Amino acid sequence: MAMPSDAEAEATLRRWGHHPTDLRATNYHGENAWHIAGASGRIDMCRWLKARGASDVMDARGDGPRCPYGGEGTTPLMKAIAERKEETAQWLVANGADVKATESDGSTVFANACAHLSCEFVRALAEKVIKVPPEHLATTTPPHHHIPTPHHPPHTTHHTPHHTPHH
């Protein structure tokens, strides 16, 4: 989706109850335009907000008196996830959204993604959250396996037949 013109974006912000000249303003729920763009799946508006220099509030926490989605501290990424807007969530993650954010009730971005989005998204998010390169994850030997090295030879089990004397 292409970035909207300034006139289109400003009209959208007004419909959302935000004044286009103050991109950091919040509504009654403590949400800024990023929250609404995330929940609406509006990647075009995310691009427009970023182009206007509003990236510093991309991770703002919704903390108004009636914050939706079950808890204060909801970020735009969490809103996109809660509304199952996977493409928007992917865009937010790719553009620097805080993947380790936690709501005041303890819910995390990762837990919410597990509940609402695809396995592919969750796998990609896990790689960012734990910062393990995907090529390492693909070649890691499970902990119960032993990898022989010159200093640690392979484990061998010697089975000695059990003989019982014949009487």
Image: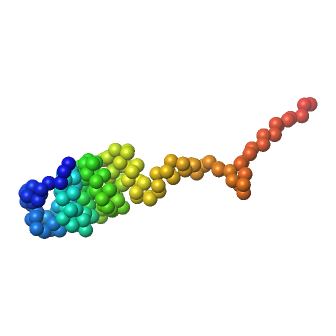
Foreground residue among 122 and 91: 91
Total numbered badges shown on the rendered structure: 0
Q: Which quadrant of the figure has residue 127? A: bottom left
Foreground residue among 13 and 77: 13
Please give the name of the residue rendered at 65% of the width and 50% of the height, measured from the top-left corner.
147
Vertical order, 18 against 123 (above or below): below
Position in image of residue 81 (x %, y %):
28, 51
Foreground residue among 95 and 36: 95
Please give the name of the residue rendered at 30% of the width and 47% of the height, measured from the top-left corner.
116
Is residue 91 toward the left or the right of residue 6 in the image?
right
Position in image of residue 92 (x %, y %):
28, 56
* Residue lying furthest top: 167
Is residue 91 toward the left or the right of residue 155 in the image?
left
Please give the name of the residue rendered at 36% of the width and 54% of the height, measured from the top-left corner.
110
Position in image of residue 115 (x %, y %):
33, 48
Task: Tell me if I can see residue 70 in this picture.
Answer: no
Identify the image quadrant of the C terminus: top right
